[in-house]
Image (cartoon, rainbow, N blue to C red):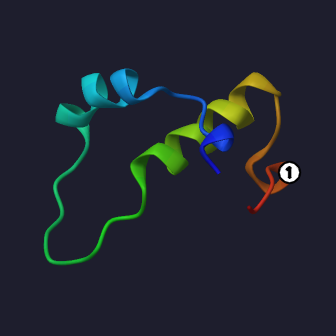
Amino acid sequence: MSDLFWLTDAQIARLEPFFPKSHGKPRVDDRRVLSGIIFTNRNGLRWRDAPTA
């Protein structure tokens, strides 16, 4: 599953200070969300055209 991520561990580590903190509610996987954003932007897609997986 790691081949689905667009960012390396080092890149995620640099971005982690900018992620919002959890306030009692469990957070989704930030790496997965960022990979989805990058995928959508690189391919010029609309959000509804991005894969759900």
Q: Nearer the viewer, residue 22 or 14?
A: 14
Considering the image in quadrants, where does the C terminus appear? bottom right
Query: Across the whole image, how many numbered discs are drawn on residues?
Result: 1
Question: Image quarter for residue 4?
Answer: top right
Q: Nearer the viewer, residue 3 or 19?
A: 3
The residue that label 1 is drawn on is 49
Q: Identify the residue shown where x is 32% and y is 66%.
A: 27
The spot of residue 45 in percent (x, y) is 82, 37
The spot of residue 28 in percent (x, y) is 41, 63
- The residue type indicated by label 1 comes to Asp
Q: Is residue 3 left or right of residue 52?
A: left
- Kind of element beneath mark 1: helix
Relative vertical location of residue 53 with respect to residue 47 in this rendering, above or below = below
Q: For the residue carrying disc 1, how many other residues have a C-alpha within 10 Å: few (<14), some (14-19), or many (20+)?
A: few
The spot of residue 9 in percent (x, y) is 39, 30
Relative vertical location of residue 43 with respect to residue 30 in this rendering, above or below = above
Q: Identify the residue shown where x is 28% and y is 74%.
A: 26
Q: Identify the residue shown where x is 75% and y is 62%.
A: 52
Question: Image quarter for residue 37?
Answer: top right
Q: Identify the residue shown where x is 65% and y is 51%.
A: 1
Relative vertical location of residue 3 with respect to residue 13 in this rendering, above or below = below
Q: Is residue 1 left or right of residue 51?
A: left
